[in-house]
Structure formats: structure tokens, C-alpha cells
Amino acid sequence: MPENSGDDEYEVKAIKHVLDRRVFKANSPIFIEGDKGGVAYILLRGDVTIYAGFQTPNQKKLMTMSTGQMFGELSLMADERRTASAYTENGCELLLISQAKLQSKLDEADPFLKYWIEYLSKRVIDLTAPKDMGGA
């Protein structure tokens, strides 16, 4: 069975009708490192690249997003500032997931699923937080 069996496409289609869409023109930042979060995105079409140190001498390409992938979710879950920048070279169409929409969906969720999602979110935040290595 192929790795991408169309499940991602089905899942994106299933949520399109409840989320807002936004189109970004070519050569546009979607968000910049240090910006306040509050929104995550799902790539519908086009290109998005995630960078650390965007437009600085230390710029580093972290990843290129594929259609159906979500990004910006860590800032949304942790209610923290962006830790990287997202940029589109050729333009893109995105679905937006706001804090309010996420909370609304969590409020509607089965109590076990709500617990599971909140638990996994906290684990992701803990695992990606900078570690204090101590030292003298």
C-alpha cells in the first residue's frame, strides 16, 4: 500500500467547509519568526517553506510543506510567538485554523478525545521546549 493512500486529501476535504481560506501572492511571508501566533494553517495548493532566521545571514531552510500538511500549530497550541518563518515563493492557498475555531471544536469533542488531544498537545510542547542543560 502506498504511503499516501489519499487519506490526507479526504481529511482536508472533510474540514474545508468549516475553516476560512486565505490566498497569498508570490514572494509573500505568511508569518515571521517572533510574530504572535494564534492561527495554524493547512496548505491547499501552492508552496510554503519554513525558515529559521528568515532573511538574515544565518537563514536556514527547515522544511518544505506538502499539500494537506499543517504548519504553525505549535504557536497555536502553546499560545507562544512564532519560532520560525513561513514564506511562499510562488503563491499559495491556505485553510486557517484560529484559536477560537480550535476551542469550539474541542468543546464539541467527545470527552476522551478532548483529553487525548490536550494531552498530546502538552507533550509536543514539552518535547519541543528548549532544554536547560544546567552547567556551571
Image (spheres, rainbow, N blue to C red):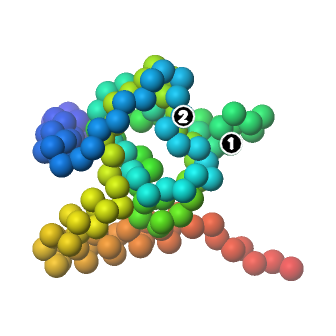
Quadrant of the rendered image containing residue 9: top left
Inter-mark Cα distance, 2 to 1: 13 Å
Q: Is residue 102 visible?
A: yes
Q: Is residue 7 visible?
A: no
Q: Nearer the viewer, mark 2 or mark 1?
A: 2
The residue lying at 25 percent from left, 77 percent from top is 115
Q: Look at the picture and state if 61 lies above or below 132.
A: above
The residue lying at 49 percent from left, 56 percent from top is 37
Left or right? Give the position of 9 relative to 132. left
Residue at the farthest right position = 136
Count the labels in the image.
2
Which is nearer the N-term, disc 2 or disc 1?
2
Q: Which residue is mark 1?
A: 53
The residue lying at 34 percent from left, 75 percent from top is 119
The residue lying at 41 percent from left, 53 percent from top is 39
Quadrant into which the C terminus falls: bottom right
Q: Amino acid at mark 1?
A: Gly
Left or right? Give the position of 32 relative to 117. right
Quadrant into which the N terminus falls: top left
Q: Amino acid at mark 2?
A: Pro
The location of residue 8, given as percent across then percent down, is 21, 41
The location of residue 63, given as percent across then percent down, is 50, 38
Quadrant of the rendered image containing residue 38: bottom left
Quadrant of the rendered image containing residue 124: bottom left
- Callout 1: 10 Å neighbours few (<14), some, many (20+)? some
Callout 2–callout 1 Cβ contact below 8 Å: no
- Callout 2: 10 Å neighbours few (<14), some, many (20+)? some
Left or right? Give the position of 109 relative to 32. left
Q: Which residue is mark 2?
A: 29
The location of residue 86, given as percent across then percent down, is 52, 39
Instruction: Determine the secondary structure under disc 1.
Output: loop
Instruction: Determine the secondary structure under disc 2.
Output: strand
